[in-house]
Image: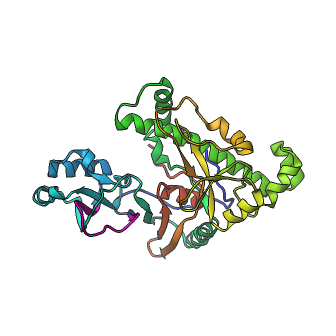
Amino acid sequence: MNHIKTYAYTHSPLHFDFKQTVERFFVEEIPLYTPSNSGNYLYLKIQKTDMSTWKLVSVISKATGLQERDIGYAGLKDKNATTIQYISIPKQAEKELNKNLTTEKIEILERNYNKAPIKIGHLKGNRFSIILHNINDKDAKFFNTTALMMQSKGIPNYYGYQRFGEDSRSYLQGKEIAQSGKRLKGSKEKLLVSAYQSYLFNRWLSERVKLSTIISANNIPQATKKLDYPEALIKVLAKQEQFFKLFIGDAITPYPYGKETYVKDMHQSSLAFSQKKISPTGLLCGANVERSKSDAYYLEEPYDDTELNALKGDRRFAWIWPKEVNTVYNPDNKKLTVEFYLPKGSYATTFLEEIGKFSLKEKR
């Protein structure tokens, strides 16, 4: 089952082959800060191929004798890719690491020291380099123009298909676990419940993109009729310059980070949004997370599960801006190399799908 998502851009689909492999998918973590060069923790900048972050942690744990919980990392990286990420371990385990870490799949690029370990979320974002195959000259040019336009206008921040497991249905198990009211057992259950959170977020975001499309693609009377909203509201929404329309009570956060507030004045918030100063956020429902208010809450409520209390909950940017976009095309072998940077938690495949207009998930 494929999650139906609404694309924000309206161009025709492009044709290219995407495969996530170690030869075609490169990702480098951009750390939140530079280590201080002194302290009780060893920071390792590691390049790994064909290995998930969890596997990396388990390999380092075996080599050093450390518990897995003593090994710090900022984010999870895929197995089917060449990835550069940062790991921290207590300094005293360095000798054992040097002696016992022998796998070809891991290369230590840099070593440093710091006073505190790396924790989940300690990263600014990720830089990607992805090679697409079988793309013709015309589509490659269009790809580049569209990617640069998205750098300026932004894209919806959907969770990628990777979040929902091999069969795209892991969120159903997550829903069952979440609604059972039991405490979560281990990282597997946590992952399933967070897939359910992500599923609800994607549904909400898709609905908001659809709503924004109706407003931008129709005149005021048509949009009023299609959405069954008061005409006065449609007029105010249509005046907003940016594509993704803001409502009173939307939870907004300074971009790329800052303290959350709510939309009180649509015109003012819309101005800040079109200048990339703020972005609206969507709900990842959970025990102690702020809901949006007023009109925005009315749009959020159908995708909120108040029985989900096993996780804390959070809010996630609904709209992001890719940066450092660059493409290089080789007409001889019809390959396009695409480079770009995304903030943490955002998916490269979501960006590529918004350009290509098709699901990149391989058919099994």
Q: Can residue 52 be seen at all in this image of the molecule?
A: no
- Quarter of the image for residue 97 reads bottom left
* Quarter containing the C terminus: top left
Instruction: Judge whether residue 30 is colored magenta.
Output: yes
Q: Residue at x 61, y 63 (%)?
A: 154
Q: Is residue 301 above or below residue 252?
A: above
> Which residues are drawn in magenta?
29-47
* 151 on left or right of 20: right
Q: Is residue 189 above or below residue 81?
A: above
Q: How is the image coloured?
A: rainbow
* 245 on left or right of 188: right
Q: Indicate the position of residue 10 as horizontal and vertical percent values.
A: 69, 59
Q: Nearer the viewer, residue 196 or 297?
A: 297
* Quarter containing the N terminus: top right
Q: Nearer the viewer, residue 166 or 288?
A: 288
Q: Indicate the position of residue 54 as horizontal and vertical percent values.
A: 30, 47
* 151 on left or right of 76: right
